Amino acid sequence: MESLDLRKISVRELNRFLHQEVPARNIRAIEILNPDGKHNLACGMDAPVKIDIRGHGGYYVGGMNKQAEITVHGNVGWGVAENMMSGCVRVKGFASESAGASGHGGTLIIEGDASLRCGISMKGIDIVVGGSVGNFSCFMAQAGRLVVCGDAGDGLGDSLYEAVIYVRGKIKSLGADAREEPMTEADYAAVKELLDRAGFDCDPKEFKRVASAKTLYNWNADANQEY
Amino acid sequence: MCGIVGLLVKKPTLRPRLGEFMLPMLIGMTERGPDSAGLAVYTTPVGQDQRKFSLYAFDPDFNWQKLAHDFKQHLGSTVSITPRANHAILTTHLEPDTVKIWLKENYPALHLLSVGQLMDIYKDIGTPAQVAARYDFASLKGSHLVGHTRMATESAVTPSHAHPFTAGEDFALVHNGSLSNPYSIRRKLEPLGIEFETDNDTEAACRFLQWRLREGDDLETALKAGFEELDGFYTFLIGTRDELALVRDAFACKPAVVAETDDYVAIASEFRSLAHLPDVNNAHLFEPMPEELYVWKV
């Protein structure tokens, strides 16, 4: 397997290789050594390649990803897979804040916990978290699904649009306009499919559904600015 | 944006290497804070009846020997002075207030950074690498330290505005974030006899804690009062004579990551500042939760 060592080359050289050499030489698998928490690893990918990052990543790992299947064998900093379009990013450890922020598509799998603002403003991405998510997760999330196998923090789903959240554990509090809704057969099937994709062994029957009550969709003059 | 770092070595045998382990941590935070850097290091304590004064002179050729001479002439007491570039550590048996008044009257241009028995403060403008080289941070020894790299957003870039700030003996605070009510805090505290030296927002937080501690709060109670009074974003890292303490505000917009092993506890704004530490990949790594106080004892 092709192997690139970040103690020998810069992040810019790495990303240039991933953007230009990988498609040109039709490379199908590559590993990145000694990431040492560096930022912007494997950002802007647009090739069907399997990328293994051996260690902890910094900010924006796999940002804007298309097609690539990226696995981080460690933790990541802020904004992992932010604005992802397609493909898959898997984090073996924990993810810091704003994981999957504004993601349009693809799957983000976090095996550990995700910190605050997971899935903020997501636009179609699917996020599956093996652990718990922090406060303000899915704030203003527009489309896509977030599955949380652990607990959720304060203000979950504040000002949600059409994104749907499934939580297995406790929800500390719901944000404005977010509400728990009954699970349908379609919900159980969706959770099962997402858990299978992540390889997590949980029972879909244990999950509850959180979605928008849609009371903020239209301006209500009588609400007197209080929601 | 700013960078913070903290390091506490658990094994006394590692204390001589504190500066060596810390240096890449501080330099790793250069992109978060390129305009100034500083740290507070906790070293071997001076005698029970002694105090250390961390002093800063704008003139790198400042005559510290003359100061020692004048000190003895005027106050009738010998003093030991250890200069490091623009800084010097002055050690004396005299009462802190006596020394403070004497310095103010005779050397008004000198800046008094801290008073204590264990803590030395060094801070200056320049990149972290430049400041570290100027004061030979790599050679620092001690049990723990807190450090900072600054990207100024709300007040001037001067050595006085660099972090750490102090609030009482052997107490140092570094801050990543910004406060929006430093002036109202200042207006509240000044009539209570708390003096300010700069218009920096972090100093306001520091003086607030100083006031709460003076009123009898312990550190945890003081920080909880801060959740109500300090309006803004912060990750605070605090050094006391035998502790490192870490706290983030409710919105946790400012990052921090902790690595703990049997040998050390290391804290930084980002993991890339910890990546060089020995055995860090097997360390217990975690991100501190908002509004939770984390304390490590020496």
Image (cartoon, coloured by chain):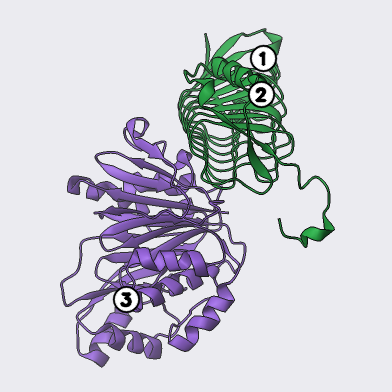
Q: Which residue is mark 3?
A: B216
Q: Earlier in the sequence, mark 1 or mark 2?
A: 2
- Residue under disc 3 on the same chain as residue under disc 2: no
The mark lying in front, picked from 3 and 1, is: 3
- Residue under disc 3 on the same chain as residue under disc 1: no
Q: Position of residue A11 (x, y in %)?
A: 58, 30
Q: Which residue is mark 2?
A: A16
Work out which quarter of the rendered image holds the N terminus of chain B and state it. bottom right
Q: Which residue is mark 1?
A: A21
Work out which quarter of the rendered image holds the C terminus of chain B and state it. bottom left
Q: Quick one: A215 or B168, which is closer to the camera?
A: A215
Task: State whether residue A91 is above or below residue B156.
Answer: above
Instruction: Please report, as a chain letter, where disc 2 is located.
Output: A
Q: Position of residue A205 (x, y in %)?
A: 53, 22
Chain identifier, colour purple: B
Picture disc at residue A37: none
Is mark 1 in CB contact (under 8 Å) with mark 2?
yes
Residue name at image x 66 percent, y 45 percent: A158
Measured Cα–Cα span from mark 3 to mark 2: 58 Å
Three-letter code for the amino acid on which mark 1 is drawn: Glu
Residue name at image x 48 percent, y 26 percent: A111
Q: Position of residue B276 (x, y in %)?
A: 39, 36
Apparent colour of chain A: green
Question: Tag 1's secondary structure?
Answer: helix
Is mark 3 in CB contact (under 8 Å) with mark 2?
no
